[in-house]
Image: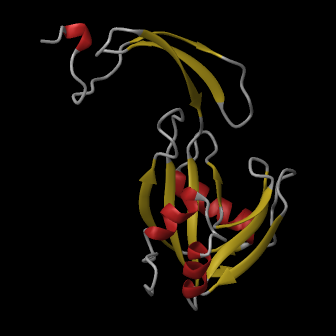
Amino acid sequence: MTQEHDREPGHPEHWPKLEHEHGPHMVLFRPRYDTLRNPRTQQVMKRLVLETPDWVNVVALTQDRRLVVVRQYRFGTSALTLEIPGGVIDKGEAHQDAAARELREETGFTSARWSYLGCVEPNPAFHTNLCHHWLAEECERTHELELDHGEDIQIGTLTLDEARAKVHAGEIRHALVITALSRVLDLRPGSHA
């Protein structure tokens, strides 16, 4: 027979937060250290949480149903990646407005036809944010790029079959990009849009 403080696993509960302290603001996130009690073992633990603004990704399709993509350097992997447009939602900005802004700034494309695809938790183990996915259809190139000082982006378009093939080949492998694409395309091998 188990005691309450050492009960069997399988019935997780919320961990009581005993205290928290913030670290320095680090541009893209702010570290927070939470001290919590494990309700199963009663052990007190300190855990890192990254307070992160919400993000947005845009599956942008041109009038001839080509996917708008961006190629850019990513600092974490020290590699060039092939992705869809997206970025950080500004404080006080609605996620649909952020989607339209990011699409326009990063690619010069705009759309009057938007559909919300839902959101995902990028990494609930230590991130606090959501990533909102939007579909923009009948996109047209109407603007020049408005890149910030930390961006260097090449724009392109792919047929939906080319996009699917690049996912299968590992040329598109950003998890949040694949998640957004999976809400529009069947990404299983051998499938078609």
Instruction: Residue at 67%, 71% (x, y): give it.
Output: 171
Residue extending farthest left? 1
Residue extending farthest front? 1
- Residue 162's x, y, as percent? 61, 85
- Residue 117's x, y, as percent? 42, 63
Instruction: Residue at 60%, 55% (x, y): give it.
Output: 98
Visible residue check, residue 114 = yes
In the rendered view, tell whether residue 166 sits above or below residue 4: below
In the rendered view, tell whether residue 107 sits above or below residue 126: below
Question: How was the colour assigned to the protein in this rendering?
Answer: secondary structure
Could you tell me how many numbered marks the image carries?
0
Residue extending farthest right? 149
Say left or right for 76 vs 9. right
In the rendered view, tell whether residue 41 sits above or below residue 159: above
| Image quarter of the C terminus | bottom left
Visible residue check, residue 138 = no
- Residue 51's x, y, as percent? 58, 30
Say left or right for 23 vs 133. right
Quarter of image, res 152: bottom right
| Image quarter of the N terminus | top left
In the rendered view, tell whether residue 7 sits above or below residue 52: above
